[in-house]
Image: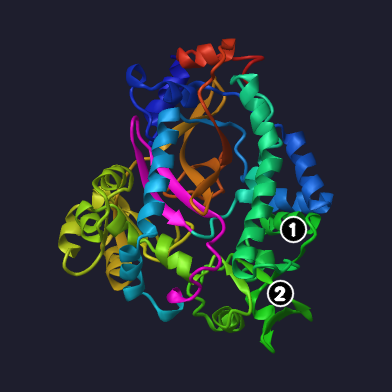
Amino acid sequence: MNENVNAAIDASSGGLHEPDYMSAEERMNAACFCLSLDQMALRIALKDQLGSPELVALMEERCPFLFSAMPVFVSDGHRQKMEEAVRALESVIAMPAYRERIFARSPAIVQHGDGGAQGVFFGYDFHLGPDTIGLIEINTNAGGAMLNAVMARAHRTCCIDSAQLADAAASGPVFEKAIVDMFRTEWSRSRPGKQLRSIAIVDVAPQEQYLYAEFLLFQRLFERHGVRAIIADPSALVYRDGVLWHDGEVVDLVYNRLTDFMLDDAGNNQLRQAYIDNAVVLTPNPRVHALYADKRNLAILSSREELELLGVPAQIQDILVGAVLPTEVVDPANSSQLWEQRRSLFFKPTSGYGGRAAYRGDKVTKRVWQDIMDNDYVAQQLMIPAGRATGTVEVPGMLKFDLRLYTYAGSIQWTTARVYQGQTTNFRTPGGGFAPVYRLPTVSTPCASACLAGTPMSGGETR
């Protein structure tokens, strides 16, 4: 293997292994330096979707590291394990015994909404090992879906076979249609026989959000399909006469990007009351967050003892115990033990998001530990992320990546990689961002053969 690539692997804190024992996908991730992202095609796609070169310029200025130039390679074995884990998780979360357990500890608003919206854009996030996977969390307002749909139009060249590239190029529009169909399904489940006329994309100070450009992409998508769409702060919504209003217009459905998952903040009062009175369709909503995304759930879903108490079949137990990283709720009873084991743990707030206030155990000081004890946290077994080489053959670097499966109603819609440096994904890493996920090449090309052999090519076939 190229000496510079070896050096990058040795310096990496990612999950790559000694070169002699690396799997085929690890070799590709370590030695393929193809820059498959066509920057001009990306700008054209963004301009086409946003309808304004000024908005494209704003997006590039505010979010320069949303898209990785390199793809990530994942084996069919890893894909199958992740898909199997999603099916197993969905089957347990649908069980009455599990739901009763969650409802018993949750605020009353969680029991509202049965039979209505199922929740858009679930994100199942995984780390990968050589032959294993590790579910790190489930998100119920996972961002980035529209960004991935646009990105699919712009990855044009790589050492993989042409059939995969053609499928990838065609997948963006297909995903966009699936997104629109998903929102229409959410509406029809709650308002059968009625027409969806308007959607409000809601977040606090939306124009200041890092992913504001994605809100604009959603707005344009909905409007192209005949649905009026607005982007609004929740404080701009008014609930009056049994109707939710924004600037004198009726809001039928709210696409919820808030991180106040239980709608407790005073600024969300109008939306909360409209939701409780069934005056608006809210997706995702407090119910689905409590069932899926509260990180205390992982302590149930990773424990064979807890799964046995729920009556989960042994085969499903085996899948979950092998796929969900072991997790415990932090409390005074186990605090001493967790402190002693902290170097092998990752600590997350139970209602956290975006890596905020999350800590690798080996970075935890006594002061941070007291913060953890004073708040609601879980401790999860640390699993080092897999690695992806970046840069060039001559001057390689190594970043980390995880995988996100976007799902709806238990069906997988899209798989993406998030490439980053640091404790958690951040979209602020040069060379990082969302990356397309490819299978290993099924057709031998000179570049792919060289990468799989551990001798990356330079020059015309790596860009």
Q: How is the image coloured?
A: rainbow
Front residue of 387/203: it is: 203
First in sequence, mark 2 or 1: give its number. Answer: 1
Q: Residue at x 83, y 51 (%)?
A: 51
Front residue of 121/233: it is: 121
Q: Which mark is residue 222?
A: 1
Q: How far from the left and from the top, in percent, is residue 411?
A: 51, 47
Which residue is tagged 2?
251
Q: How far from the left and from the top, in percent, is residue 174?
A: 68, 42
Where, quadrant-wise, is the C terminus in this rendering?
A: top right
Q: How far from the left and from the top, in percent, is residue 37?
A: 67, 32
Q: Secondary structure at mark 2?
A: loop
Q: Which mark is residue 453?
A: none
- Would residue 154 appear left or right of 427 to someone viewing this image? right
Q: How far from the left and from the top, in percent, is residue 237?
A: 68, 79
Q: For the residue carrying disc 1, how many other residues have a C-alpha within 10 Å: few (<14), some (14-19), or many (20+)?
A: many
Q: Amino acid at mark 2?
A: Val
Where, quadrant-wise, is the N terminus in this rendering?
A: top left
In the rendered image of this protein, does residue 4 appear above or below residue 287? Answer: above
CA gap, disc 2 and disc 1: 14 Å
Front residue of 99/60: it is: 99
Look at the image and give the residue range highlighted in magenta: 110-139
